[in-house]
Image (cartoon, grey):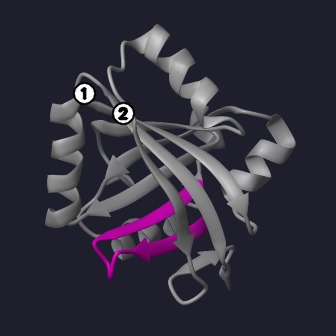
């Protein structure tokens, strides 16, 4: 069995200008509305980068093209794979996300397959648990593996129905 199976639930871009990227993707993919979540803090007690504790702040914007979630991420401060990508490549497609039931098991499967787990974390008291693995073998910079709890699922459903 692989690390994760479909479908892809999210496609994400990293940007240095949320407004411009929202406008571009709305025009190209018909996203009707974006929900901005400013200053999302990831602390060293819940987030690691290559196994080391890290603190970072991101601005996030979420929209939907049909049932597919589009996520825009603007790094604000601190190190992370989003800042690394932006510095190395400029704005662009960053990752696809597969939902998994068990992030530690998915990370163990990635390790066993020789796919590096680059960043891991959780937020909202574990309501979301995530890991980013190297996606370069499959043609994407990163693949996110995420477990979404019921409160966050309800929040996402609210955003999707508002769009």
Asked whether 48 or 117 is in front, the reply is 48
Residue 128 belongs to the span the image colors magenta: yes
On screen, residue 2 above or below 123: above
Say which residue appears at 36% left-offset and 20% top-offset.
31
Mark carried by residue 23 = none
Magenta-colored segment: predominant secondary structure:
strand
- Where is residue 12? Give x, y as percent: 51, 38
- In which quarter of the view is residue 66 placed? top left
Say which residue appears at 20% left-offset and 33% top-offset.
162
**What range is drawn magenta here?**
115-133
Quarter holding the N terminus is bottom left
Q: Is residue 20 left or right of residue 72?
A: right
Quarter holding the C terminus is top left
- Where is residue 45? Give x, y as percent: 54, 90
Between the C-alphas of marks 2 and 1, the distance is 7 Å
Q: Is residue 139 visible?
A: yes
Mark 2 and 1 residues: CB-CB less than 8 Å, in contact?
Answer: yes
Residue marked by disc 1: 163
Residue marked by disc 2: 63
């Amino acid at each position: 069995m692989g690390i994760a199976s479909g479908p892809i639930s999210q496609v994400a871009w990293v940007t240095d200008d949320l407004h411009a990227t929202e406008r571009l993707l709305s025009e190209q993919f018909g996203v009707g509305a974006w929900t901005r979540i400013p200053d999302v803090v990831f602390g060293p007690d819940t987030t690691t980068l290559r196994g080391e504790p890290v603190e970072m702040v991101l601005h996030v914007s979420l929209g939907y093209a049909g049932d597919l979630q589009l996520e825009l991420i603007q790094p604000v401060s601190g190190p992370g794979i989003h800042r690394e990508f932006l510095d190395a490549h400029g704005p662009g497609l960053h990752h696809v996300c597969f939902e998994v039931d068990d992030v530690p098991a998915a990370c163990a499967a990635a390790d066993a397959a020789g796919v590096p787990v680059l960043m891991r974390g959780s937020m909202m008291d574990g309501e979301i648990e995530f890991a980013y693995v190297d996606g370069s073998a499959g043609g994407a910079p990163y693949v996110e593996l995420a477990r979404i709890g019921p409160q966050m699922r309800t929040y996402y459903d609210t955003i999707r129905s508002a769009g």
